[in-house]
Each structure stands twice: as C-alpha cells, then as structure tokens.
C-alpha cells in the first residue's frame, strides 16, 4: 500500500508542508512531489541558491507558490525556531506537514578518534535543531485538521555499525524523538512516523560510499510513493510506525 501508493491528482492541495533540506537529494524531490500534488511547500535549507532553484522549478510546474526559509541548522537557536513558527502562523495559520529530512553525515571514523567538533555539529543539526523546530511547530501542527510529521532515519538508526559514529547515534536519537512524540500525540490529529529511505542516489550516499556505482542505487524519485502516502490523508490513522524505503 505505502510503497506502491498512487496519489490522486491534487491530493495535497490546501496543505502547507515544510521540508527541511529541501535544496538537494531526497528533500528536493519530496518538495517537488508535494508541490506537484498541490501543496504549498515551505523550503528550508542552508544553501539559498539551491532553494531558489527548487522554487523556480515549482513555479515552472504551475504549482502553488512556495516559500523559502534559508537557515543553517548548525546555528539554529530556540529564538530562531520560535521565529520560524511565528512566521508560519502569520503567513499560513497552520502547518499540515513537516518532513524532517536535512542531515549531516559527519565522519566515518572510529569513536576512539572521532573528531569532537564534528560529533557536536552532527548532533546539533540532526538532533537538536530537529527537536527545536518540532517543539515550536507543534502548536501549528495541532491547528491543522490532519497533520503529518515525518522523521528521517537510516539503516544505522536502530542497529549500530562500526565507524558510523555521530550519524548513527543521531539517528537513534531521531527515532527516539519520533517515538516519544508519536506516543504523546497519539490521540490528537497529528501523526508521527519514521522513514528509513535506504540506499539512495544522492550526494550524502556518494560521500559515504565513494567507490560505489551510483547507477545501481534507487533514485529519490523512486521513494516518492512512500513520501506521498505519509503526507496524504490516506495515512491519517497511521502513527508511530517506521517505514523502510
Ligand atoms: P543530501 O546530502 O543529498 O541532502 C541533504 C540536504 O540537507 C541538503 O539539501 C543539505 O543542504 C541539507 N542540509 C544539510 N545540513 C544542513 C544544515 N546544517 N542546515 C540546513 N540544511 C542542511 O542527503 P540525502 O538526500 O541523501 O539525505 C536526506 C535524508 O535521508 C537524511 O536525513 C539522510 O540521513 C537520510 N538517508 C539517506 C540515505 C541515502 O542513501 N541517501 C540513506 C539513509 C538515510 P545543502 O544542499 O546546502 O548541503
């Protein structure tokens, strides 16, 4: 059902959906897909030029005009997260979807010699900034009639593997955050789920596996039935679940 989901035309129209890391890779594809299905997409990411390119692609599709929030999650403060939530409240009054997708890979290196600053940066982007955004956006999600929050994990997010260091630990934390939140919001209109995309043809994958032939990997586009399903009202009763891409 979720993996061969075929969304109806305009199934996300009238929905306001934020995608973090929307400038590249899986996030870019998801933003384009949600826009094609009629959503107003809020593109959050760190490289303004990439966000502007996605913005232009969405405009060229004739989809609803997106919004851009250029922000480096490495420097995300509580005040900034609150400011983003206030902007969304002023502009849109609610948030129907939140795809936590932006992440840093950090180094592939043993814990014994793991670079300390890199560790802290990965935890800041992948965990702390995700928590801050979530914390301040929950009130906006509660206002929506049926809101969906998706957290992005990894194959090393519930089974540790040598040398995956901060990335693996941050994905365990991401899954923990998602499970705690899903439980807290169980009887509300906000659902919370986890996607592990699996090996996908992106810059991050190429950094982790530089010698691999990327042509053998699935494309971000191939994940879109699942990403669409979890934003669609078809998954309204689905919460606290983990999906593999
Ligand atoms: P990419 O590196 O291709 O894209 C990540 C996006 O996140 C980029 O647009 C990047 O911005 C943005 N981003 C990174 N750091 C920050 C930051 N500090 N502030 C704001 N934005 C930031 O990765 P993928 O598309 O491969 O990964 C998407 C998600 O899927 C991640 O959560 C990843 O962990 C997960 N995943 C991916 C797998 C794969 O095989 N690709 C496998 C398992 C999980 P910029 O473009 O400016 O760098």
Image (tube, helix red, strand yellow):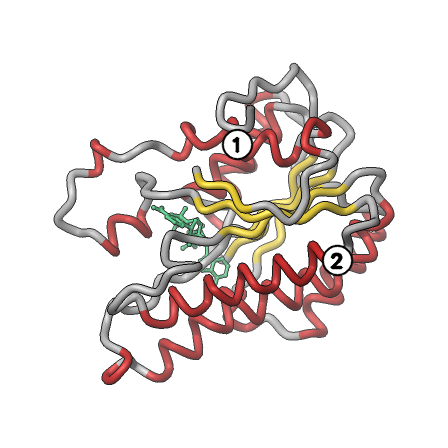
Please tell me how crowded label 2 is: few (under 14), some (14-19), or many (20+) other residues with Cα within 10 Å. many
Residue furthest left as drawn: 211
**What residue is pinned by disc 2?**
137
- Say above or below: 51 vs 34: below
- Of the 4 image quadrants, the one containing the N terminus is top right
Which labelled disc corresponds to residue 226? 1
Q: Position of residue 236 (x, y in %)?
A: 73, 34
Residue at the image point whose x is 42% and y is 29% from the top:
221
Q: Position of residue 226 (x, y in %)?
A: 52, 32
Q: How many marks?
A: 2
Direction from residue 203 to residue 34 in the image, left or right:
right
Residue at the image point whose x is 64% and y is 74% from the top:
77
Q: CA distance from mark 1 to mark 2?
A: 23 Å
Residue toward you, 195 or 28:
195
Residue furthest top as drawn: 9
Task: State yes or no: Cβ of the residue under disc 2 lies below 8 Å from any atom of ligand 1.
Answer: no
């Amino acid at each position: 059902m979720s993996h061969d989901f075929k969304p109806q035309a305009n199934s996300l129209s009238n929905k306001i959906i934020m995608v973090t890391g929307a400038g590249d890779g899986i996030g870019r594809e998801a933003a384009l897909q949600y826009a094609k299905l009629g959503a107003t997409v809020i593109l959050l990411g760190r490289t303004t030029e990439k966000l502007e390119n996605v913005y232009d692609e969405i405009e060229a599709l004739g989809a609803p005009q997106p919004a851009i929030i250029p922000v480096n999650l490495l420097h995300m403060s509580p005040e900034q997260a609150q400011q983003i939530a206030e902007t969304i409240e002023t502009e849109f009054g609610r948030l129907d979807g939140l795809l936590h997708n932006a992440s840093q890979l950090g180094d592939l290196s043993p814990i014994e010699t793991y670079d300390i600053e890199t560790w802290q940066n990965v935890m800041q982007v992948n965990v702390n900034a995700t928590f801050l955004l979530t914390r301040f956006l929950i009130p906006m999600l509660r206002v929506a009639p049926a809101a969906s929050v998706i957290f992005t994990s990894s194959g090393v997010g519930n089974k540790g593997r040598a040398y995956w260091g901060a990335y693996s630990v941050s994905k365990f934390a991401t899954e923990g955050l998602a499970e705690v939140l899903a439980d807290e919001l169980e009887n509300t209109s906000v659902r919370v789920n986890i996607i592990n995309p699996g090996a996908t043809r992106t810059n991050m994958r190429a950094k982790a596996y530089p010698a691999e032939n990327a042509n053998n990997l699935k494309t971000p586009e191939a994940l879109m039935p699942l990403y669409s399903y979890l934003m669609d009202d078809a998954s309204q009763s689905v919460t606290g679940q983990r999906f593999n891409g």
